[in-house]
Image (cartoon, grey):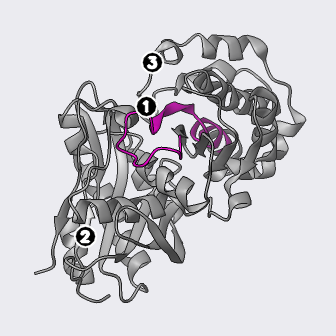
Amino acid sequence: MLKAKLSKRPLKIAGTMSGTSLDGVDVAVVTTDGHEILEFGDSHYRPYTAEEQAVLTAALGKWQGPEVAAAAEVVTRAHREALAGFEGCDLVGFHGQTLAHDPRGRGTLQVGDGEALAAALGVPVAWDFRSADVELGGEGAPLAPFFHFACAKWIKAESPLVFLNMGGVGNMTWVDPRAESPTQPEALLAFDTGPANAPINDFMRAKLGQPYDKDGKLARRGTVETGALELFLAESYFARMPPKSLDRNDFSEMVELVRELDDKDAVATLTAMSAAAVAQGMEHCPKAPEQVLVTGGGRLNPVLMEMLAVSLDCPVHAIETVRLDGDMLEAQAFAYLAARIANGLPTSSPGTTGVSALVGGGVISHPQ
């Protein structure tokens, strides 16, 4: 990589994401001034090995200790390797790996060493995106909404729409592209809808030794247990007004609700829970969206997509239908947010995280 000159605009930025599914590191390049998306560039996926996944899994939910330190080493090394082939970038947006998220209590923890990464790559690194938001009373999540607003402008949307990320945890951003800026109060509403792929993946690993329900084949053969679904929807989280956010393991009891079921019925029920959580969340939209664009691994599960289509009152499409990359959107988001940090622009607002005022999160570490 080349040494950055952050005074120039626009910036060519490599954004990274290691999500709650713990599958690997996404890297995606975006050229942007922090306002407009000017160009999408190359991307790369670096999977975690089984050994690395085991280290990360052992650290989930922990705030300190040897497991957290080991996870931080894995995350930093994997990102260094994933970014090694990206020459000519001005800046890196490094999200790190979320291990624990408790914005109303202990805060939020993303591991990975941005200073070490900057030194290794010879490029400035923007990181620690969430802490400032939480310190000012925000949820610290979701953080992609400002980028979603730029995407709505990129695709020339003219009516309100929803970006729905179905990763380990589900989150949605309602966008009104008629607003001039994402900082306007009426432009955005965002929050975590509930669990998405994480409980399904955890069940598949624990019971069947498989990383996920490929193509929804097991769920397709199963029957939804409506009693378990009703118990799930009775959780108090769904009655809370947004903005709101979740830790990956906040709904770990979902697996307990289906543990006695046949495997195929259990996976069908977990999939239905993810879709039902989204349907509950859609009730909070200020205006009915024209469409829902689905990103993240969940869009590749045809059973989940069918359940969403049945339960929502508007068209549901994979985000590729508008020429965006559903695998790389989160990494692209942190490239975009890094540009906003470099240019002193806010990265979250009362409508996206519930923070008391517009806040620009993140720090930039420069190579020595």
Q: Which residue is mark 1?
A: 246
- Snapshot quadrant of residue 243: top left
Q: What amino acid is labelled 3 in the image?
A: Met
Task: From the top left corner, tell me how far across and down residue 368 is, in percent.
Answer: 10, 81
Sequence-wise first label, 2 or 3: 2
Query: How far, Cα to Cα, is label 1 from label 3?
Result: 13 Å
Q: Which mark is residue 107?
A: none
* Mark 3 burial class by Cα count in 10 Å: few <14, some 14-19, many 20+: few
Helix or strand or loop: what does disc 1 sit on? loop
Q: What amino acid is labelled 1 in the image?
A: Leu
Q: Tell me which residue sits at (74%, 10%) in the image.
A: 227
Q: Which residue is mark 3?
A: 241
* Mark 2 burial class by Cα count in 10 Å: few <14, some 14-19, many 20+: many
Mark nearer the viewer, 2 or 3: 3
Q: Mark 1 touching mark 2, by CB under 8 A?
A: no
Front residue of 222 and 296: 296
Q: Tell me which residue sits at (27%, 50%) in the image.
A: 346
Tell me if residue 273 comes above or below residue 59 in the rendering.
Answer: above
- Residue 181 in the magenta stretch? The answer is yes
Task: From the top left corner, tell me how far across and down residue 310 is, in percent.
Answer: 82, 30
Residue 248 visible from this viewpoint: no
Helix or strand or loop: what does disc 2 sit on? strand
Sequence-wise first label, 1 or 2: 2
* Residues in magenta, as a range: 176-204
Task: From the top left corner, tell me how far across and down residue 209 is, in percent.
Answer: 67, 49
Mark nearer the viewer, 1 or 3: 3
Q: What amino acid is labelled 2 in the image?
A: Val
Task: From the top left corner, tell me how far across and down residue 299 is, in percent.
Answer: 70, 49
Tell me if residue 97 comes above or below residue 117 in the rendering.
Answer: above
